Amino acid sequence: MERRVVVTGMGVVAPNAINLEEFSNALYHQKSGIKEIAELKRLGFACTLAGIPAVTEELKKKYFTELTLKFLTSSAIVYGCIAGVDAWLDAGFELKGTDEKIEPFWNAGSIFGTGIAGVEPLRDAFYKVDDMNVRRLGGRVIEQTMNSGPSAFLSGLIGLGNKVTSNSSACSTGTEGVIDGFEFIKNGKADIMLCGSTDCDGPYIWGGFDSMWVTNRKMNDRPEEASRPMSATASGFIPGAGSGALVLEELEHAQKRGARIYAEILGGHINNGGQRQGGTMTFPNNYAVRKCISQAMENAGVKAEQIDLICGHLTSTIGDVAEIRNWSEVLQLKGKDFPYVNAPKTLIGHCLAAAGSIELVAAILQMQGGFIHGNKNSVDFHPEIAAIIDREKAPLQTIQKEINIVGKSSFGFGDVNAVLFFSKF
């Protein structure tokens, strides 16, 4: 008999809020975290807007020692550790401390991904090497720049003793990591997995996207209106950063310790379009997307009419129309029969590798709170989307709604796809 897996803890560091209560309120009241960034303007970026979490030095001191803060410059690791530790504590676990006599949690591991762990320390390393100051690099560069940095730091803070690794699959990283953690527990390899993703902020990570013309450069004077998923005037995404974390736990293990249960993971699927059938490094193979959705539904035992909400990838690009069309074709539902759909990127921008995990936290909070946050910037609903689904299924304003089953989709560069379903427990 396969083991059931539930979510017992969550943590979030998002551009519009840094804890669960504030994040839930921000979603409900449609509070945007997108602002104009002076440094991007100074550097001549075409898009000078971004979503950056308001992490203060005082907040960092709650999670890191003074010694660590002297060298830690990777924002991805900072965001990931805050979200991950918060999720661990939210699940009702304790931090064991670092005494060498204390054993790790042998039944608990982590899959915590990132796009790139540390751009700033890597940049500093380049300069020092080019200036022939190799000996001044210090001994803390590698741990901040390796992709496994976030999960490694979390393992040290918490004392995780099972599988600890970081995945990296572009913008599907977070959703993919949760699916992998779910399957790891389901197959009896661990009882607890801390899963999520994180990504850093700043011009060195966002410059490449700016040069590709995939960011919105037309609305720098209107930051809160610039991220426009499902809108006719959508003209590119707004970059963001942050982290989302979820504690996944085997059901009986959670019940025995009296844990609060947020949701049950039903199943999901990960695939790749192989950059065939119209798919490229930067554009999805739509057949593979539909296959991913269909297989995820089969794995989760979910029928089309059971889905109450789709928390879409929906980046505010030309891909939005294709995403809605793909869901509609798989579900064989249109108009008012289509599930409700919303896009957290309206409020936080596109947090890249962290997008999936932050948006999963957002979706579970909505299910817990019985609401669907509005898509406030899709005032000019895209006509091709309007031809597929009814306007009321992508509400402008937040609505009260009981939600029992949610589908979360994430797609990324490299033609990667990840779709996950979870339910109210």
Image: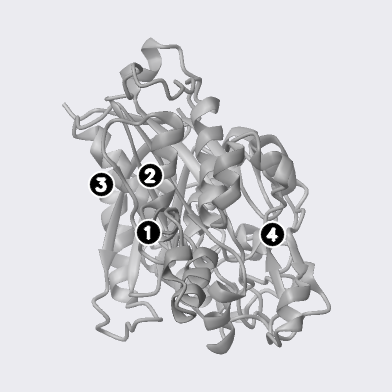
Q: Which mark is residue 299?
A: 3
Whole-number angstrom distance, CA of label 4 to CA of label 2: 30 Å
Residue 366 percent coordinates (x, y): 61, 41
Label 4: how many Cα within 10 Å (few below 14, some 14–19, many 20+):
many
Residue 309 percent coordinates (x, y): 52, 50
Foreground of the two, 153 or 166: 153
Judging from the image, what secondary structure is the residue with disc 2 in?
A: helix
**Amino acid type, mark 1:** Met
Label 2: how many Cα within 10 Å (few below 14, some 14–19, many 20+):
many
Residue drawn at (37%, 77%) of the image: 284
Earlier-in-chain disc, 3 versus 1: 1
- Mark 1 sits on what residue? 146
Judging from the image, what secondary structure is the residue with disc 4 in?
A: helix
**Amino acid type, mark 3:** Asn
- Mark 2 sits on what residue? 152
**Amino acid type, mark 2:** Ala
**Is 297 situated left or right of 258 in this image?**
left
